[in-house]
Amino acid sequence: MKSLWGYVDKSGPGGCWLWTGARTSDGYGTCRSAAGRTSRVHRVMYEALIGPIPEGLVIDHLCRVRNCVNPAHMEPVTNTENVLRGTGPTAVNAQKTHCKHGHPLTPDNLVKRTDRRECMECRRIREREYKARRRARLGLAPKVRDEAVSV
C-alpha cells in the first residue's frame, strides 16, 4: 500500500499539492486510517504538518482547490467564515449592499429572518400596495396619507 505521499502531486498550479487518490463527489480527497476510518486528506495533512485543528474550526482552502493538500494553502476558520469566503449563494447574498429595488441594506433598513434578510422599505411598499388592493376590492375609498405642510 502506498503512503499518503504517493498520492500527492506537488506540481499543481499555484503551488497546490494535488491529491490524486480517492475523492468525494464534491472533490475533496479522502483516505482511510489504519483503524478503517475515512478522513478528508487535507485535514490529515494539516494536522500532520502543522498541528491540531482547533476545536470548533474547519479548514478553509485559501487556494479554492478542493483536492489541494498543501497546508500552506489552508487556514482554520469558523464554519461561518468559511461559507462567507466562498462563492455560494450565502456568500453572494451576504456581499450585497442594496436590495433588488436599489434600497440600501443597512442595519436600520433590515429585518433579519431565520433564513434571509428583508428590506424594510420594500416591505413597507408591499404592505401599502396590499392594503390599497384590499380597500379597492372591498369598495372602500383610497386612504389619503397626511403630508406635513411646511409654512
Image (cartoon, rainbow, N blue to C red):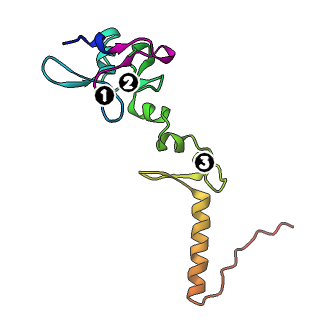
| Label 1, residues with CA under 10 Å away: few <14, some 14-19, many ≥20 | some
Which residues lie in the magenta part? 8-23
Residue 3 visible, this angle: yes
Residue at image position (62%, 44%) is: 97
Q: Earlier in the sequence, mark 3 or mark 2?
A: 2
Residue at image position (17%, 24%) is: 37
- Residue 101 placement, left or right of 61: right
Q: CA distance from mark 1 to mark 2?
A: 8 Å
Residue denoted by label 1: 23
Residue at image position (39%, 14%) is: 71
Quadrant the C terminus occupies: bottom right
- Residue 85 placement, left or right of 125: left
Residue denoted by label 3: 105
Q: Is residue 143 above or below residue 63?
A: below
Q: Amino acid at mark 3?
A: Leu
- At mark 2, the secondary structure is loop
| Label 3, residues with CA under 10 Å away: few <14, some 14-19, many ≥20 | some
Q: Nearer the viewer, residue 46 or 67?
A: 67
Q: CA distance from mark 3 to mark 2?
A: 36 Å
* Callouts 1 and 2 close, C-beta under 8 Å: yes
Q: Amino acid at mark 1?
A: Arg
Q: Earlier in the sequence, mark 1 or mark 2?
A: 1
Q: Nearer the viewer, residue 92 or 128?
A: 92
| Label 2, residues with CA under 10 Å away: few <14, some 14-19, many ≥20 | many
Residue 58 horizontal/vertical position (percent) = 35, 26
Q: Is residue 21 magenta?
A: yes
Residue denoted by label 2: 67
Q: Amino acid at mark 2?
A: Asn
Q: Is residue 110 magenta?
A: no
